[in-house]
Image (cartoon, rainbow, N blue to C red):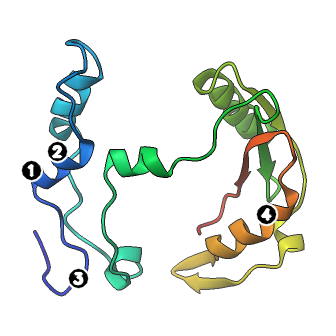
């Protein structure tokens, strides 16, 4: 179901497959199969709700090749640690599971759980829109000065909505 009042239009299947790029050179039984059959498992969303970003913002899509060209964060010996900064108090088991996931998924990078700064210290805008939401752009821009020199990523997490 498409609502023509929304700015965002769901790309057609051919457009979505074109965004992946040329996969002809990938070996059989590889990522090629996943990419070709992905739409059987992940259907595009056809409804938008009040408060959705694309309801109010007109954005062009991005192809996989565009993403690769724009990616500048290269792993190096100097920058090889993923720091996880909880912005709020949260259960230690939850934090341990996130750390374990990152260690497993981003192996052999190091993962360090640290408390650099809290959400209160950042003093970002917030609003109530059905529930409490924080301004993610402000969080990102204010976190830049806290990024350690050896960080490949600094991930700040919170339990509230953005």
Q: Which residue is mark 4?
A: 143
Camera-nearest label, 2 or 3:
2
Query: How far is mark 2 from mark 4, CA to CA?
Result: 35 Å
Q: Left of 116 or right of it: where is 6? A: left
Q: Quadrant of the N terminus?
A: bottom left
Q: Which mark is residue 17?
A: 2
Residue 14 position in % (x across, y down): 9, 50
Give the residue at x 14% y 79%: 3
Task: Please identify, in this view, whether the residue under mark 1 or under mark 3 is nearer the observer.
Answer: 1
Q: Position of residue 5 (x, y in %)?
A: 18, 87
Q: Residue furthest front?
A: 69
* Label 1 sits on residue: 14
Q: Are marks 2 and 1 in contact (CB under 8 Å)?
A: yes
Q: From the viewer's perspective, tell me whether residue 61 is left or right of residue 52.
A: left
The numbered mark, 4 or 3, whose residue comes first in the sequence reads: 3
- x and y percent of residue 127 in the render? 63, 85
Q: CA distance from mark 4 to mark 3?
A: 33 Å
Q: Residue at x 37, y 81 (%)?
A: 57
Whichever of labels 2 and 3 marks the residue nearer the N terminus, that label is 3
Left or right of 106 in this view: 46: left
Secondary structure category for the residue under label 1: helix
Mark 1 vs 4, N-terminal side: 1
Q: CA distance from mark 2 to mark 1?
A: 5 Å
For the residue pair 4 and 48, the one nearer the viewer reads as: 4
Q: Quadrant of residue 158?
A: bottom right
Q: Residues within 10 Å of mark 1 (few under 14, many from 20)?
A: few
């Amino acid at each position: 179901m498409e609502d023509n009042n929304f700015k965002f239009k769901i790309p057609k299947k051919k457009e979505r497959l074109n965004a992946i790029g040329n996969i002809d050179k990938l070996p059989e039984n590889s990522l090629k199969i996943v990419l070709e059959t992905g739409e059987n498992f992940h259907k595009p969303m056809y409804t938008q709700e009040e408060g959705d970003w694309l309801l109010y913002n007109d954005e062009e899509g991005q192809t996989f090749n565009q993403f690769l060209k724009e990616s500048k964060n290269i792993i190096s010996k100097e920058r090889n640690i993923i720091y996880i900064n909880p912005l709020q108090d949260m259960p230690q088991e939850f934090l341990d599971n996130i750390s374990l996931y990152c260690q497993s998924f981003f192996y052999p990078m190091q993962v360090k759980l640290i408390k650099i700064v809290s959400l209160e210290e950042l003093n970002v805008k917030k609003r109530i829109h059905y529930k409490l939401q924080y301004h993610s752009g402000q969080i990102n821009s204010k976190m830049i000065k806290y990024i350690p020199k050896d960080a490949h990523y600094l991930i700040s997490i919170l339990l509230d909505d953005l």
